[in-house]
Amino acid sequence: MQILVTGGLGYIGSLTCIELIEAGFEPIIIDNLSNSKLQVLNRIEALTDVRPVFYQGDICDSAFMQSVFSAQKIESVIHFAGLKSVAESVSHPLEYYANNVNGTLVLLHAMRKANVKSLLFSSSATVYGDPKVVPITEKTPTGATTNPYGRSKYIIECMLSDLFQAQSDWSITILRYFNPVGAHPSGTMGEDPQGIPNNLMPYIAQVAVGRRDVLSVFGDDYATEDGTGVRDYIHVMDLVEGHLAALKTVSKKSGLHIYNLGTGQGSSVLQMIAAFSQASKKKINYKICPRRPGDIAQCWANTDKAARELNWKATRTLLDMATDTWHWQEKNPQGYV
Ligand code: NAD
Ligand code: UD1
């Protein structure tokens, strides 16, 4: 069964392709290489003995998208392609709306034309903004987003909901990721941020491997147990398994399905540093700095709905996340080169 994977050479998309192949699906990858490298295809092949069909192109290119649907027999789409830096979205909002919102519109038009009506979409806990109550359930209000990246995800969710209201034979699954971290357990595939990492785990990993001197801890005066920010970090392989679970269950049924993908547990920045030190046996240099503008104190997921309906639960620990990130970083200090 052919599954179109947009953004399939990126961090989460590429690992999803591994699991799709192992589960007997045939991923067809589209990526414009704006935030990934062709080298990833070799790594997928090395791990699975399969080199997936790859189209280099842009999801905003309508003729290109239609040509892919005409050439293949696609049954479902997993849509990862998009831009994801919060800071960059603040300085380049139009690029974020064009790529994320318009790119999704072009994809949906191409799907409709090809009569493909099953979609899994990568959304984010960012659609919840700064929640009044944790843990966050799927019924927690959305929309009070704080930056263009978050708004692009929220707008896409609204578009998908409107589409389903009009065409109830579609199966649309919105997966709201919490904080994906970690790497493939082989240490051959993982996150490869370009430039200075924005996110905590890749930054810690680059300090551990000697690429950066010191981690800035953004604030130790939050109303949390140790004063640092608390997030729901989820191992990327658990996250990927969540996609497979959704693909095998709800994506076969028409409906608008929405799930939080997290572990249900919050961890602080200092706990992440401690886990990484334990995994890497390295001291992580850090200094306490002022809060980062736009950050919230704490956020974690209630994951009961995914457990009930997808029969899926994250199983990997913080130490697993740190260990796999470390293996990837140690073996590939400069990422995919
Ligand atoms: P990533 O940047 O590693 O992967 C995205 C891939 O999409 C890249 O390979 C990039 O080259 C490609 N791409 C971007 N725009 C494209 C376009 N117009 N046409 C074709 N390809 C395009 O990001 P990721 O971490 O794997 O995230 C995947 C998805 O999950 C994104 O939509 C992201 O917003 C969402 N998400 C990620 C996180 C996270 O922490 N990583 C959290 C929540 C949601
Ligand atoms: C960020 C994005 C979110 C996106 C998610 C993807 C913001 C405001 N939010 O979430 O939209 O979906 O990434 O994973 O950017 N921290 C440090 N030092 C660092 C980096 C981070 O102390 O160098 C702290 C942060 O203050 C926060 C925690 O680590 O408390 C996690 O930060 P990060 O990894 O950037 O994720 P989020 O901010 O939760």
Image (cartoon, rainbow, N blue to C red):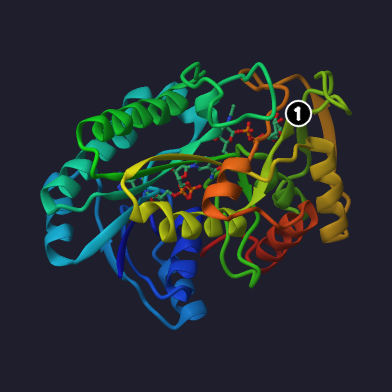
Quarter of the picture containing the N terminus is bottom left
Residue 33 in view of the camera: no
Give the structural element (helix, strand or loop) at label 1. loop
Image-quadrant location for residue 94: top left
Q: Which residue is mark 1?
A: 229
Residue reaching furthest bottom?
49
Which of the pair 183/37 is nearer the observer?
183
Q: Residue at x 41, y 26 (%)?
A: 154
Mark 1 belongs to which amino acid?
Gly
Ligand 2 quadrant assignment: top right
Instruction: Rate crowding at label 1 as few (under 14), some (14 to 19) or many (20 or more) other CA atoms within 10 Å.
Output: many
Give the x, y percent position of residue 17.
43, 65
Looking at the image, residue 279 sits to the left or right of residue 292; the answer is right
Which of the pair 158/295 is nearer the observer?
158
The residue carrying mark 1 has its beta carbon less than 8 Å from ligand 2: yes
Q: Is residue 274 above or below residue 292?
A: below
Looking at the image, residue 161 sits to the left or right of residue 327; the answer is left
Give the x, y percent position of residue 282.
87, 56
Q: Is residue 197 above or below residue 293?
A: below
Which of the pair 130/285 is nearer the observer?
130
Count the labels in the image: 1
Residue 104 in view of the camera: yes
